[in-house]
Image: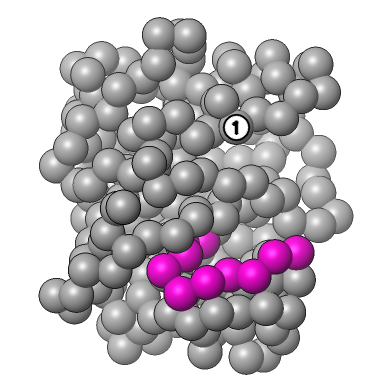
């Protein structure tokens, strides 16, 4: 069982609910259609790698992309909650990377097949420690930045989300229960790109924290 740290407490992680296509410029850079509802997929806890750890790109892919995301820790069970009350179910925020095997994902999409093998592989979810909600007054005004080998690749703001954190929690909880210890990844801004063996990644979100991983 994987645990994450919040204010000195180790919290067991449940599922990781992820949102695709939540930043307009990212949708454009991949040539995707704008969805009329949130695009939801799941990563297992086994996909987590802690800050300071190592990402291992599976041998069945030759095009792994980085995606920095604001991670939201669910503090109590949320089922069919309203947008107005959704943030009451949040206990913390963290920095995450949603690593994606873009070549594998595209092949699966072309065949009309699920693409978990492109999203849920081991070490596909680097994750920082979390800070409490008292440290983040407004989750919709946070700067996200990702560097690869010291070069800025992604530099965006959570204000550019098409659907807010509260709207995402409400939407996902209408499909299935979000339990205490679950994590919600909220989408990535533009600038995604390929990572390779030997790369050093650093992801930062203001007021939230920093995440560093290397690529094997």
Question: Looking at the rendering, in which quadrant would you find the C terminus?
Answer: top left
The stretch drawn in magenta includes residue 111: no
Q: Which type of secondary structure does the marked residue at label 1 adopt? A: helix
Asked which quadrant contains residue 143, the reply is bottom left
Judging depth in this view, the residue of 196 and 142 nearest the camera is 196
Left or right: 156, with 213 as reference point: right
**In this rendering, position of residue 78 left or right of residue 145:** right
Position of residue 150 measured from the top left corner of the image (x, y, whole percent): 19, 33
Q: Is 182 a magenta residue?
A: yes
Q: Residue at x 52, y 89 (%)?
A: 88
Seen from the viewer's position, the closer of residues 195 and 77 is 77
Instruction: Quadrant for residue 136, please give it.
Output: bottom left
**Residue placed at 79% from the left, 17% from the top?**
110
Question: Can you say whether 155 is above or below 56 in the image?
Answer: below
Residue 213 point in image, percent of width and height: 21, 37
Q: In this view, does 98 lie to the left or right of 39?
A: left
Residue 30 falls in image quadrant: top right
Magenta highlight range: 175-184
Q: Residues within 10 Å of mark 1 (few under 14, many from 20)?
A: some
Residue drawn at (47%, 45%), measured in percent from left and top?
44
Q: In the rendered image, which residue does mark 1 sit on? A: 116
Q: What percent of the width, then of the height, locates residue 4?
A: 26, 61
Question: Count the marks: how many?
Answer: 1
């Amino acid at each position: 069982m994987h645990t994450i740290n919040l204010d000195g407490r180790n919290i067991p992680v449940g599922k990781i609910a992820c949102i695709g296509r939540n930043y307009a410029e990212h949708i454009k850079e991949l040539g995707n259609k704008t969805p009329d509802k949130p695009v939801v997929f799941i990563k297992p806890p086994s996909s987590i790698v802690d800050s300071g750890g190592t990402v291992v790109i599976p041998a069945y892919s030759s095009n792994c992309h980085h995606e920095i995301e604001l991670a939201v820790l669910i503090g109590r069970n949320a089922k069919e909650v309203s947008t107005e009350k959704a943030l009451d179910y949040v206990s913390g925020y963290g920095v995450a990377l949603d690593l994606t095997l873009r070549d594998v994902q595209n092949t699966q999409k072309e065949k009309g097949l699920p693409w978990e093998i492109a999203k849920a592989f081991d070490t596909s979810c680097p994750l920082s420690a979390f800070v409490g909600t008292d440290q983040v007054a407004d989750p919709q005004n946070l700067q996200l930045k990702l560097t690869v080998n010291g070069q800025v690749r992604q530099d965006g703001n959570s204000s550019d989300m098409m659907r807010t954190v509260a709207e995402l929690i409400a939407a996902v909880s209408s499909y299935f229960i979000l339990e205490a210890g679950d994590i919600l990844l909220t989408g990535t801004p533009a600038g995604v790109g390929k990572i390779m063996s030997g790369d050093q990644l650093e992801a930062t979100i203001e007021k939230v924290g920093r995440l560093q991983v290397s690529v094997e």
